């Protein structure tokens, strides 16, 4: 059981953190996140229409081209330092779309490039995105096995 001195220290710390933390306007943050995330998705939809009607692509090929261009744009804007400014403005709205994934791969690589190509770029590139990739692959294999097991019985 905590004594009164520990409660006093915790309360003082919490009050200090509250006093020095910047105040956020949640409504403005939500609107910015929605607007920027929606804009990124609209750009993706525009690319889809361009590749579909302009170049005649369909199906998986169409999806692959749109995804590749969005990933390239996210990585390119991160390299220029533009995506960081978009992230500061939009918050979570810039993280959710596919461009945010590209940003999460490129940012650590840029940050650690001074450590060399192997330990800096290659090793640090997947610090943030690596667990996501591993979890995605592992869960898709598990779901595939369940799907295969269930539908192979019938």
Image (spheres, rainbow, N blue to C red):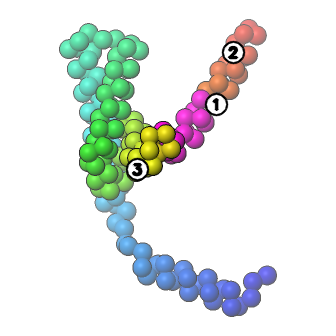
Q: Position of residue 109 (x, y in %)?
A: 42, 44
- Choose the circle earlier in sequence order: 2 or 3: 3
At x 63%, y 31%, the residue is 139
Depth check: 19 or 34 in front?
A: 19
- The C terminus: image quadrant: top right
* Farthest-out residue, right: 1
User: Residue beneath label 1, please?
Assistant: 138
Left-right relation of 112 to 77: right
Q: Residue at x 55, y 82 (%)?
A: 13
Where 133 sits versus 2, above or below? Answer: above
150 sits to left or right of 77: right
Mark 3 vs mark 1: in front: 3
Q: CA distance from mark 2 to mark 3?
A: 46 Å
| Principal secondary structure, stretch drawn in magenta | helix
**Boundaries of the magenta span:** 122-138
- Residue 148 badge: 2
Query: What secondary structure is marked by label 3?
Result: helix
Magenta residue check for 133: yes
For the residue carrying disc 1, how many other residues have a C-alpha within 10 Å: few (<14), some (14-19), or many (20+)?
Answer: few
Judged from the image, the secondary structure of the residue bearing numbered disc 1 is: helix
Q: Which residue is mark 3?
A: 114
């Amino acid at each position: 059981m905590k004594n009164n001195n520990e409660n006093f220290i915790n309360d003082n710390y919490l009050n200090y953190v509250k006093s020095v933390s910047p105040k956020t306007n949640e409504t403005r943050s939500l609107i910015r996140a929605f607007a920027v995330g929606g804009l990124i998705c609209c750009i993706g939809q525009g690319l889809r229409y361009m590749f579909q009607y302009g170049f005649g692509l369909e199906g998986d090929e169409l999806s692959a081209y749109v995804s590749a261009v969005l990933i390239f744009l996210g990585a390119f804007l991160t390299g220029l330092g533009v995506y960081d400014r978009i992230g500061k403005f939009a918050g979570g709205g810039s993280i959710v779309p596919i461009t945010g994934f590209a940003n999460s791969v490129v940012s650590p690589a840029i940050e650690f490039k001074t450590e060399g190509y192997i330990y800096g770029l290659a090793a640090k590139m997947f610090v943030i995105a690596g667990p996501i990739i591993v979890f995605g692959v592992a869960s898709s294999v598990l779901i595939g096995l369940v799907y295969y097991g269930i539908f192979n019985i019938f």
